[in-house]
Each structure stands twice: as C-alpha cells, then as structure tokens.
Image: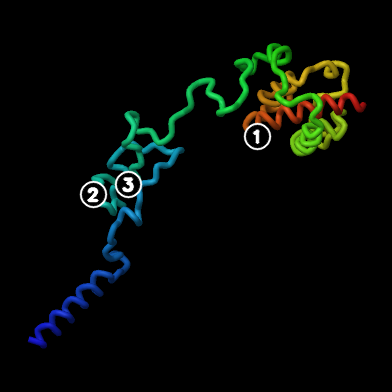
C-alpha cells in the first residue's frame, strides 16, 4: 500500500513538472491565460475582424485571436468615441461658439475670465510667453526673436496695427493661428492662452 502511494506521488510530481516544461516550439501550459494575454482596448486601433491574429490565440474561451480588440460593450464596437461637436471641457467658459473664421467676433466678444487687477496673471503670462512666444516675437514683442531672423513676416506686437487688439483677439489667434503663426490650441490650455494675452497687453504698455 505504501509503495502504491509512493508510485502515485512520483507520477503526480512527474506530471506536474512535465506540464511546466518549455521548449523552442512548446512554451508549456499557461494557467489563467486571460491574465497573461488580456485583450487591449487600444483607443487608436480598431480591429473588427475576429480572425485577425488568430495564430497567436492563447485564450480558448473568447473564440477569437489575441489581436482582435473591438469593444463588445457598445453598439459600434468602438474603443473610444469622439466627443460631440462643440463639446467643451467641464467648467470651461464658452461665451461664444468660435471657429477659425470668427476672429472679429472673438475680438469683440471674448473677455478674459481673469480680473484686471490680478497681477499674478501677468507674471504667469510672462513665463508662458517666454516658453511659447519669445522665440518668434522676441522678449519685448518687437518681432526680433531667433525664429524671426529666419522667417520674415513675424508680427511686431508693438506695431501700430497691433496696439489696439483685444485680449479676445489674441486668444483667438493663439487658438487657431494667423498668417505665419500656427495654431497652438492643442498645446496651450485656454487658461494659459488668456494669461499670455494679458501679458501681451501689458508688454505693449511698457514699450
């Protein structure tokens, strides 16, 4: 009887060790493969073909290849839905619906959310101006930055044509760009655009 238990023990241990063996063409058994090869719902890919990547299928329960990554939990199988047109960030002030062609409306309508007496806005605006604007417009706004030496036509913010522009005008130009200046709406948050606009107006006063 004791020998029987010993034999069974040896056989059991041998079977366990054999199941953990791996080789060039045999990687061994995977327990709970979902933990090793979870389906990635990547927002920038949308593989809807369930046969895609089936050669690497390590999960017999889901019925499709590992690279199939469409989300089964919404009717369009999408991993990331686009926001509704004109959607704005929660808490974001939206005094007017703007497009790239609404510069004049923005100049006349948009107003800074920061109070005029807030000196901290000017200080923060200077730091942002130095990061995003100085290399083109120059430290004093005279269109003498390093980039302006290579590309003619950078706006001189102290020129007569710019002295009367509003903060709303500046905000719109930073957002959508104008002339040689590209759009910076994706790089600079709305609050920081207003800070830069405030600093530009203060910069004009000091020249």
Give the answer, above or below, for where 189 lies relative to 23: above
In this rendered view, identify the residue nearer to me: 116 or 178. 116
Disc 1 crowd, CA 10 A, few/some/many (<14, 14-19, 20+): few
Would you say 198 lies left or right of 160 here? left
Where residue 80 appears, as percent x and y from the top left, is: 43, 34
Residue ID for mark 2: 61
Q: Residue furthest left?
A: 1
Q: Residue furthest right?
A: 207
User: Residue 162 sits in which quadrant?
Assistant: top right
In front of the other: label 2 or label 3?
2
Tell me if I can see residue 152 in this picture: no
Residue ID for mark 1: 187
Residue at image coords 32%, 29%: 75
**Of callouts 1 and 2, which one flags the residue occurring earlier in the amino acid sequence?**
2
Residue ID for mark 3: 53
In this rendered view, identify the residue nearer to me: 135 or 115. 115
Specify the quadrant that holds the C terminus: top right
Q: CA distance from mark 2 to mark 3?
A: 15 Å
Residue at image coords 30%, 56%: 33
Task: Label 1, secondary structure: give it.
Answer: loop
Task: Label 3, secondary structure: give it.
Answer: loop
Q: CA distance from mark 1 to mark 2?
A: 44 Å
Tell me if I can see residue 73 in this picture: yes
Point out which mark residue 79 bears: none
Give the answer, above or below, for where 104 lies relative to 11: above
Specify the quadrant that holds the N terminus: bottom left
């Amino acid at each position: 009887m004791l020998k029987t238990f010993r034999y069974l023990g040896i056989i059991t241990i041998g079977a366990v060790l054999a199941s953990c063996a791996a080789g060039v063409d045999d990687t061994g058994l995977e327990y709970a493969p979902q933990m090793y090869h979870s389906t990635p719902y990547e927002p920038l890919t949308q593989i809807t073909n369930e046969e895609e990547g089936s050669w690497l299928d390590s999960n017999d329960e889901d019925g499709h290849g590992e690279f199939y990554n469409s989300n089964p939990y919404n009717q369009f199988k999408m991993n990331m839905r686009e926001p509704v047109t004109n959607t704005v960030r929660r808490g974001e002030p939206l005094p007017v619906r703007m497009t790239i062609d609404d510069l004049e409306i923005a100049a006349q309508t948009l107003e800074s959310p920061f109070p005029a007496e807030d000196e901290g806005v000017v200080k923060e605006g200077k730091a942002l101006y130095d990061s995003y604007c100085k290399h083109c417009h120059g430290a004093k706004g005279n269109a003498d930055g390093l980039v302006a030496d290579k590309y003619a036509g950078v706006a001189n913010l102290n020129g007569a044509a710019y002295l009367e522009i509003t903060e709303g005008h500046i905000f719109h130009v930073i957002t959508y760009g104008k002339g040689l200046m590209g759009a910076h709406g994706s790089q600079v948050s709305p609050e920081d655009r207003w800070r830069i606009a405030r600093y530009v107006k203060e910069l004009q006063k000091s020249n």
